[in-house]
Amino acid sequence: MKAETRGIHGGYEESRFLGSSAVPIFSTVSYAHLTAEEIEEVFAGKKPGYIYTRISNPTTSILETRIAELEGGIGCIATSSGMGAISATIMALLKSGEHLVSASGIFGGTISLFDKTLKRFGVDTTFVDSDEAEDFESAVNEKTKAIFIEAIGNPKMNVVDIPGIAEVARKHNIPLILDNTLISPYILKGYESEADIVIHSSTKYINGHGTAMGGLLTDTGRYDWSSGSFDDIRELSKEYRNLAFLVWVRNLIYRDLGCCPSPVNSFFMLQGLETLCFRMEKHVENARRLAKWLEENKDVKWVNYPGLPSSPYYGRVEKLFNGKGGGLLTFGLGSREKAFRFINSLEIAKNLANLGDAKTLVIHPASTIFHEFSDEEREAMGVTEDMIRVSVGIENIEDIIGDFDKAITTAMEE
Amino acid sequence: MKIDVNGKSVDLEKQFTISELLKKMEVKMPDMVSVELNGKIIRKDQYDEMVVKDGDKVEFLYFMGGGNGFFRRTD
């Protein structure tokens, strides 16, 4: 089955749900069992069955199965947000005194999690300011338990050497965690990325309409947990084989953190998945055309879109993402003031903190998503004062360009 | 030849690769199944070349919603 078909039918059998063509929303907290003996068996893991929606839910299970199939992974766990998926993954793998290696040009929320929150719990992170595998390898030490990267850095718009970094992770017997939010499982299937765990903020392209928060973590099945670097998971693998990581997350970290999604939000994600492939094609095409138009505009100082032939990352986009550079780009008009005037003059594009929506969205990252960081920290993350981030929507591209043209002209007037 | 699939004995008329066996056994959701051959995890990129021989033990494992998430399923 191809991705377009799987996104519509994957993981769902109507015959198990009274023939309901749409996936039913199981809006329930708990699940009644006929006997005390039966619920005892379900709690003990001897019998399949649901217990409590904080642990699992039938609507969410269908989403998880559909994603695991799309990613070519061995299983998926859906969470309340992308940050929930990253938190659960990192907390499942690392404990106090251990070390994480991370790319540096990544989402501000993820940097805050690693550099502020997890630091309080004794987990140390080295941020690598490079796209090359050898620099990631240099940052690995004897306490390193995982490497974290984004498929396209947000908002740095860089593309790291994913297969090269996967090779480094394999060499050191640690998992590579890939946040694939900006590229989606349609453009880059989790298993083929060579990463061991793939994360998505499904709030973005998978939902696609800005209507629900969600996250996903998928085990691609590449990492051998039975001989891995994690004592607890290796022990668990004696019983649960290579599903030990997922069982460990589901039955301990995820259950205890309480980062489960609402079943209603899982339904929204399933709806979004039905059109993901088609929307991604349009996001990519519109982003490519807008980036090209911006590049040719005399008032635009710089444009960063990895899908532009002039981008230093274009070669990697062709090799890793089949030439599809995603729907996010950044550009600058030379100053923060011009950026603000531009944003204030737009009529179609919305000024808000999200991406991957059907609508075109803009934001000034330095004063919003990255406001808690110092000027030096922002510079290291590649967030300049004049940067405008654009999540290119699926509207008619001529309307988007017309909106940008007018707003740039106004921004340059004063 | 005889092999053992999830604890059940199965007769096969010839040697099968893992890919062929997934089809032959009509394994559901073959893209998300975790396959073990004689206790060793088989990566997806080995499915086409890895051959199942007489006496081998094969496990098809699934991570599903409900219970503890871990299932052996052949139906």
Image (tube, rainbow, N blue to C red):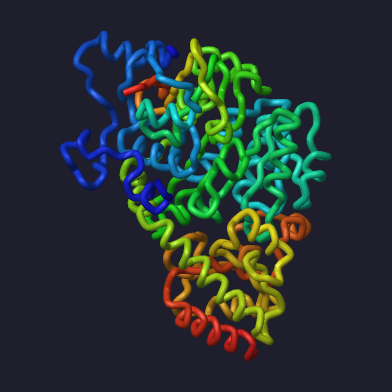
**In the rendering, at what x and y percent does residue A166 appear?**
69, 40
Q: Is residue A360 left or right of residue A18?
A: right
Residue in view at x 68 percent, y 56 percent: A159
The residue closer to the viewer here, A304 or A263, is: A304
The residue closer to the viewer here, A98 or A41, is: A41
Looking at the rendered image, the quarter that the C terminus of chain A falls into is bottom right
Q: Is residue A236 visible?
A: no
**In the rendering, at what x and y percent does residue A343 appear?**
55, 76
Q: Is residue A297 left or right of residue A272?
A: right
Q: Is residue A169 visible?
A: yes
Residue in view at x 47 percent, y 55 percent: A204
**In the rendering, at what x and y percent does residue B30 appear?**
42, 33
The extreme top residue here reads A37
The residue closer to the viewer here, A251 or B24, is: B24
Residue in view at x 78 percent, y 52 percent: A130
**In the rendering, at what x and y percent does residue A382 appear?**
73, 60
The extreme left residue here reads A18
Q: Is residue A265 left or right of residue A163?
A: left
Q: Is residue A284 left or right of residue B65?
A: right
The extreme bottom residue here reads A413
The residue closer to the viewer here, A317 or A414, is: A317
Q: Give the vertical position of A339 relative to A41 (above or below).
A: below
Q: Give the vertical position of A256 relative to A199 (above or below).
A: above
Total marks drawn? 0
